[in-house]
Amino acid sequence: MHKRKIMENIYWMGAVDWDRRLFDSLIPLPDGTSYNAYLIEGSEKTALLDTVDPPMSGELMAQLGQVDKIDFIISHHAEQDHSGAIPRVLEQFPEAKVVVTTKAKGMLMDLLKIPENAFITVQDGETLSLGNKTLKFLYTPWVHWPETMVTYLQEDKILFSCDFYGSHIATSDLFVNDQGRVHEAAKRYFAEIMMPFRNTISRNMEKLRGYDIRMIAPSHGQIYDQPEWIMNAYRDWVLGNPHNVVVLPFVSMHGSTRQLVDHLTSALVDRGVRIELFNLAVTDIGKLAMALVDAGTIVLGAPTVLVGPHPLAAYAALLANALKPKAKFLSIIGSYGWGGKTVETLAGMIPNLKVEVLEPVLCKGVPSAPDFEALDKLAGTIAQKHKENGFR
Ligand code: FEO
């Protein structure tokens, strides 16, 4: 794709990765992604904001073939999907300086072996003039590594946010034209890489409140020319109360745990609690992560394999522990054959979750009447806890 004009002297560059289906060899990308770089031509200086993932650097270099000079490469984030092509850009524009936070400088020297004399470090709030355009750099740690910053283009009131507010979507549309689709993609993205850093992100959001932001140009997905809705969505995901929702990832080997799951589902629905089920044998882990953003309670459905939890259930526990959702309650249900330490093992895997653990329901073999009664009691407890906490 050729470079595309956003407004006078400001261009989208980069690459749309239509084929990519996995990020970090972990995160599913059902809709592909894009690596957005931006070119800002001031009256005196020209800046390139971020680059692209190394396998797609050819596309960026072809776009830069029509550019006479690059004075600054603004690197918001050291992760290679944005920084990886900096060495190639420096080969073509050796006079360019790489503008970074102090932390990013060391990371880029380690990751990409960029020489120290290629960098200019900027402090939080520092500005850089391109002549008739002024870049203001704001430190925004943990979106999504500790070194990240964003750039506010003062004259045009555009926030170049890199990962922050991004979404994994491959599309030829430059601007958001389907809010529903982007909302889902942005929420999935938030869940997978931002959710663990909610406290820091809320401070970053607070910091940006003082700026008149007319457009957000992230480095993944489409540009927000009406940014208010995505900023509001982030406020809900980061600061909002959990919802009246139980998220129940489960796996069942011979159907017994599935019986428990189905009974609890009905019991919760009868009590006015919404529930989202994820059969871990077939589920998209990204959808599970997205559901965890709103979950009031997490229930793990885990049969015992040998003496511990089924490995897929253990994986879900580790994932929830890594993502640190704001759920307030957790329980475990499952069937076992002759014994084991499923509950103790799973409980030991979730030290990051600040949850009250509700009485687990484990049954030997196929569940019977007392097990179903215990599930009804668990459903009642969850409904009551959600009500007391104002989950809606
Ligand atoms: Fe899109 Fe954290 O890199």
Image (cartoon, rainbow, N blue to C red):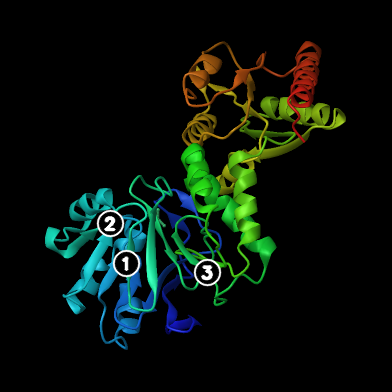
Does residue 42 appear to the left or right of 382 in the view shown? left
User: Left of 336 or right of it: where is 314?
Assistant: left
Which quadrant holds residue 231? Answer: bottom right
Mark 3 near mark 1, Cβ–Cβ under 8 Å?
Answer: no
- Nearest to viewer (mark 3 / mark 1): 1
Q: Which labelled disc corresponds to residue 122?
A: 2
Give how far across and how far down residue 351 sits, in percent.
Answer: 47, 22
Q: Which residue is mark 3?
A: 170
The reply to whether residue 282 is in sight is no
Under tag 3, what secondary structure?
A: loop
Real-space Cα separation, disc 3 to disc 1, in angstroms: 32 Å
The location of residue 226, given as percent across then percent down, is 63, 67
Question: Are dots 2 and 1 in contact, CB under 8 Å?
Answer: yes
**Above or below: residue 366 compared with residue 285:** above
For the residues marked 2 and 1, what is the alpha-carbon distance in whole angstroms? 9 Å
Estimate the spatial distance between the alpha carbons at disc 3 and disc 2, rounded to whole Å: 32 Å
- Amino acid type indicated by mark 3: Ala
What amino acid type should be assigned to the residue bearing mark 1? Leu
Nearer the camera: disc 3 or disc 2: 2
Q: What residue appears at the point 33 percent right and 55 percent down from the top-left corner?
A: 79
Classify the position of the N terminus by image quarter: bottom left
